Amino acid sequence: MLSFAVYSDGKPAAKVNLEGAYVVGTDDVPLRAELSFAAGVVRCTKRAAGPAGLALLWEVKSVGIILLETVRVQEREEPYILQVELARSRLLRITHKVEDWGMLDHDEANIIAGVMAKSRGVTDVFTILQRSKYVDLVYDIGVDKTFSPRIIGVEEINHVLDESPLRLLGTLVEGIVDVFRAKVSDRSSVIGKPLREIPFSPDWVVAAIQRDSDIHVPGADDTIERGDTLLVIGRHGKQDTLKELLL
């Protein structure tokens, strides 16, 4: 039996969206299979033997709902953990891409190639680095930006697994503005209130609201409901205000 245990907030998930989900084989061809979900486990009953994976629409925090696949695994009695297998698949894909580019652990060669490109008039030069000790060096000798597959891999895992209620997504305008993803707590006092009545101003602006699979830009009369996830933009260092309002 091919099966995947699904967790939410550390507990078996109560529901999983299997609309559009399918089982895929080692050659990336969809396989005939029956999918079911019960007691926190997705079960895949397929006709063909051999390793297979599950492809399904999955909510990635701060990104939205995208199609993800697990790695191809052998059937066994014990369920695999769905989030772990999704993360493993993303890491494997990143590794394959790096191999396709022909840039792996040769940091020195990558740095030399970047400097040569810069000396020949290339405006923006990006260098792949595996070791952080070279980061300051490459900036000093003219390389504009660095790219680390390891860091990207960690970020991919965080997107899949991170369910923290308040998460900093980035900082803009040279550190003046912060962008947060905030999940509204069941205990929040703002539930059911329109935005015009919630004291976000002058520090914060709600840029978007995600409710289930729907994402929209809100107006002043839109309300915040239990389970909503907000994209909030505001002044750097004022996250305590967000915590008081939403968590």
Image: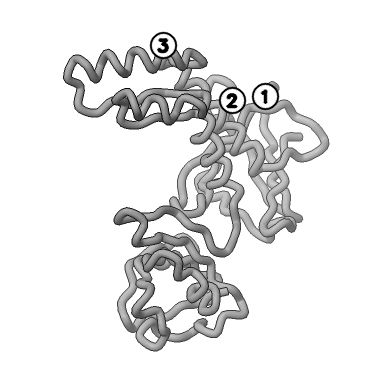
The location of residue 108, given as percent across then percent down, is 44, 13
The residue nearer to you, when weighing 67 against 158, is 158
Question: Which residue corresponds to mark 1?
Answer: 51
For marks 2 and 1, the one nearer the N-term is 2
Q: Is residue 149 above or below residue 236?
A: above
Left or right, 216 with reference to 180: left
Contact? badges 2 and 1 (CB < 8 Å): yes
Please, what is the three-letter code of the amino acid marked with disc 3? Ala
Which element is circle 3 on? helix
Residue at (40, 79) in percent of width and height: 200
Residue at (41, 67) in percent of width and height: 209
Crowding around mark 3 (Cα neighbors within 10 Å: few <14, some 14 to 19, many 20+) is few
Q: Is residue 107 above or below residue 220?
A: above
Q: Nearer the viewer, mark 2 or mark 3?
A: 3
Residue 109, disc: 3
Residue at (51, 35) in percent of width and height: 151
Left or right, 152 with reference to 177: right
Where the N terminus falls, by quadrant?
Answer: top right
Please, what is the three-letter code of the amino acid marked with disc 2? Gly
Contact? badges 3 and 1 (CB < 8 Å): no
The location of residue 110, given as percent across then percent down, is 40, 15
For marks 2 and 3, the one nearer the N-term is 2
Residue 25, disc: 2
For marks 3 and 1, the one nearer the N-term is 1
Which element is circle 1 on? loop
The residue nearer to you, when weighing 128 against 227, is 128
Contact? badges 2 and 3 (CB < 8 Å): no
Residue located farthest toward the right when viewing the structure as drawn = 77
